[in-house]
Each structure stands twice: as structure tokens, then as C-alpha cells.
Amino acid sequence: MKFWKRLMCTARRKSPWLFHMNSGSCNGCDIDIIAALSPRYDAEQLGVLLQGSPRHADILMVTGPVTNNAVSAVNTVYGQVCGPKAVVAIGSCPATTNVFIDSRTLSGPLDKHVPVDVFVPGCPPRPDAIIAGVVKAATLLAERGNDPPKTAVAIATAEEVQP
Amino acid sequence: MNPLLTALARMLIFPGLLFAVPAAWFFLWVERKAVARMQERVGPPFMQPFWDFVKLLGKSTPPRPGIAGFIMRTWPLIAVSSAAGAVGLLPVLPASGGFEGDLILLLALLELPSICIIAAGFSSRSIFGEIGSAREAALSVSYNIVFLLAIVSIAASQHTFRLEALATMPSSPLHWLGVLAILVCLPAKLHINPFSLPNAEQEIYAGPMTEYAGPELAMWELAHGLERVAATGLVATLIAPHIFAPHIALVWAVSLLAGCLFVVLSVAVVLLLSVLAAATARLAIDSSVRFYWQCTLIFAVLVISSAIFVRFRS
């Protein structure tokens, strides 16, 4: 039983599958997510795969400040991701709503609606910071397993991975 | 040796489950790694398909009550068992047994995963699953004409439906033409680019697999891997005896060599398919169907006519 638990822990750390969701972003962060998965940064060597269906994903990556129209979509997609799951907020928008703060068309930031595990700040963040955030989320998933998410959150920045 | 014991050993040890499951993961890795290297990437680590499988086993699935949920959970299991059975039937080792008509059983088992995918897409009630299933159905009707005609022509020219007789038949132009025709059909059978239409990633989410999660998805991944082992293994068993003629008296050495050659040839076929996958983009469904109905039908006509010619001459 203990062996199985350790095996599962390693497997969760080594195989983070992503689902990418845009909640009203300007597409800057989305472009950098694509860059992180491109041959130049090659996230696949860490086992990262972008999945087409939220049912297959472990990590939900949300960009954008969560507009009023996007709230129900964010909740639906979060419910469709099967547990154990983690949420990574990509960019400053889902963290603080950024320059759109106090706009009446927004109902952000993201952690008002779903529990966020890792914030990757930046406008947009660098691809290496996004990869660092995904790795952090995968490590969190491996540690906590099926337990509910804790309140403490992690922040990933490019300085951690750049010399 | 007891024929029942031999059959069990083939099904469970080599080339059956004990060999086929690690081979399935290995082939999935070879494909991903080869595509990555061709795109100048490092690519996934060696154990990646295994970690993916274990992780998927540990994930939860959405509750699906009633008979609809039961049916949905059954399809991946049928797909895995039929693909594993197909691998177990392959005459890899010389004089490994088999029975008259096992070719027909192999063809049926190779076809079953594709039927399971179609049924799974429709039973998941997802619109993306239904689109994927419809594409899979259209594609399987197109490539199977050439695939089945090629194998049946080879068999008809030898007057037998026994796999072992086909694997050891003398080399002839008909034989190589048949192998070529099977190779042309493999990308569509294994859903590799440019025929990755049924599970077109991103385009229709994940096609028939859209609603599957956790252990059920793990079973589908395994089924895809086993299908690769079975389909490339079929090509390898058809080619192998013409490269390696058993002159050695030792049975164990012959078996070992035949096993190694089988693995090497299968990996070569997987690499060939990966080159194709990396070099091409996904075709539209009408172009794919047109390709198989118009361009590859020439293979079908050639193998059928040469099979008739061989029969009349003998």
C-alpha cells in the first residue's frame, strides 16, 4: 500500500496534463502559454501535455480577469476537471484583475470563484515562469493527493528558473 | 508440449500480456520521442507513458449511474482485451502453434478496438464524441477495404487462413505488395497524422474520448498502445521470415533471434509512422476518405489481380 502511494506520488509529479482556459484575457498570456509548450521551451520533457478535454486534465490554467460572462464557464470547467486537481492563475489579471480593477464588467479576481494553488504574476509572465508554475502545481498535487486544497498558495516567478 | 499450455503461454507471456503491455508503453514513448527529436526538442522521458498510466489510475471519475454508465465503462475494457488478444495471436516464434482460421480471428480482434471507439463516442452522449465517432466510422470503412483485401489476397494465394503458413510463405511480389498496402493503411488504423481525425486534439476536444477520465482513460491509452503493438507486429511477422531464415539447429536460439527481430522490425515500423506523423498535418475527413477510396484502391486491385493470377498458375 505504501509502495502504491509512493508510486502514485511520483506519477502525479511527473505527468501534469494541462487544460487552458481563457476567462476574458487579452491573449498575451495565452501566447506565452503556447510559447512554453513550443519546441524552444519544450515542456514535454517534464511530462507536460496540453489536453483538449478538461476531463483529461490535472491542472487548470486560467488566464484573464474573469469577466461577468466567464464566471459560469470557469465554475463549469473547474467542476469538469476530475480530482485530484490544481489551478494555476497565469498572469496578473486572474491574481488582481490588473489594470481592469474596479471595472463593472468584471467579477474577478479568480480566487473569489475557485481555489487557486499557484499564481504566476507578470503581464504577461515569461514562458519559463509558466513552466515553473506548472511544476510547482504538479509537486503540490503529488504532496496533497486527494485531500482538499489548502489556503496557502505558491507564487512562481521567472527568477527561480533563470540563472 | 500441451497445446493448451502453449496457447496460454502465448496469450499471457510472449507475445501476449506480459510482453505486450510494456511494449505498448515503449512504442508510445518511441513515437512521442521520435516526433520530439524531429522537432529539435528533448521529448518525454523513457518512463513517461507508464507514469501517465499510473497517474490516470489514481484519478477520480465523474459519477455515471445506471446502465449508460456501465456501458460506457465497458468499451475501453473490451478494446484492451481484444487488442491484447490480437497481439497474443501473432506467430512470432517459429512453430508456436496456431489453428486453421486464426487469421480471421486476428482480423476481427484488430477491428474490435475501432468499433469500441465508435460505440464509446456515441454512448458518451457528448456532441464532440459523436463527431469523432462519425469520423472514425467513415475512416474505418475507407481504409479497411484495402487492408482486408491485401491480407485476404495473400491468404487466398496460399490456400490457407493460418497465420503461421502466411508468415513462412515464400517471398513473392504479391507478398511485398500486400505488405505495402497494409503499411499504407496503418496511419489511419492507428489514428496517426495525417489521419488523426477521430481524436483530433483541440479541434473537436478529444473526439470519442472527450468524456472519459481517470482509469477509463488509462485503459484507452493502453488500448491505443496495444493496437500499435498488434498492427506493427502483423507487418513485422509478415516481413521477418524473409530476412531471417532459421538455419540454426538450437530451438532456443532460433526463438530468441525471432523474438528480437520481431521487436526490431516493429520499432522500425513505429519510427516510419512517426516520421510521417511529424512531417504532415491533419487532413480533412473528405480528403482522407477520398485518399483511401481513390488513391490506394490501386493497391487493392493489384493484390487481388495478382492473387487470382497466382491461383490460376498453381
Image: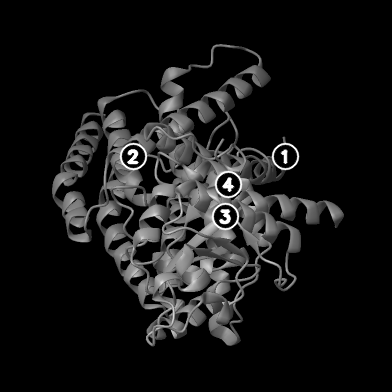
Q: Residue at x 68, y 61 (%)?
A: A141
Question: Which residue was labeled with disc 1?
Answer: B2
Give me the C-alpha separation between circle 4 and circle 3: 23 Å
| Vertical comparison of B176 with A4: above or below | above
Give the secondary structure at mark 4. helix
Instruction: Tell me which numbered mark, 1 or 2, is placed earlier along the sequence.
Output: 1
Residue B216, quarter of the rendered image: bottom right
Name the outermost residue toward the right: A2
Give me the C-alpha separation between circle 3 and circle 1: 58 Å
Instruction: Tell me which numbered mark, 1 or 4, is placed earlier along the sequence.
Output: 1
The circle drawn on residue A133 is 3
Residue B121 seen in the current view: yes
Asked whether the residues under the numbered discs 3 and 1 touch, taking CB atoms below 8 Å apart as contact, a structural biologist would say no
Q: Position of residue B196 (x, y in %)?
A: 33, 53
Chain for mark 4?
Answer: B
Chain for mark 2?
Answer: B
Give the secondary structure at mark 2. helix
Give me the C-alpha separation between circle 1 and circle 2: 46 Å
Give the secondary structure at mark 1. loop
Q: Is residue B257 left or right of residue A9?
A: left
Give me the C-alpha separation between circle 1 and circle 4: 36 Å
Kind of residue indicated by mark 1: Asn
Q: Position of residue A17 (x, y in %)?
A: 54, 57
Q: Is residue A107 left or right of residue B84?
A: left
Question: Which residue was labeled with disc 4?
Answer: B49
| Vertical comparison of B271 with B280: above or below | above
Instruction: Tell me which numbered mark, 4 or 2, is placed earlier along the sequence.
Output: 4
Labels 1 and 4 positioned on one and the same chain:
yes
Give me the C-alpha separation between circle 4 and circle 2: 19 Å
Question: Which residue was labeled with disc 2?
Answer: B278
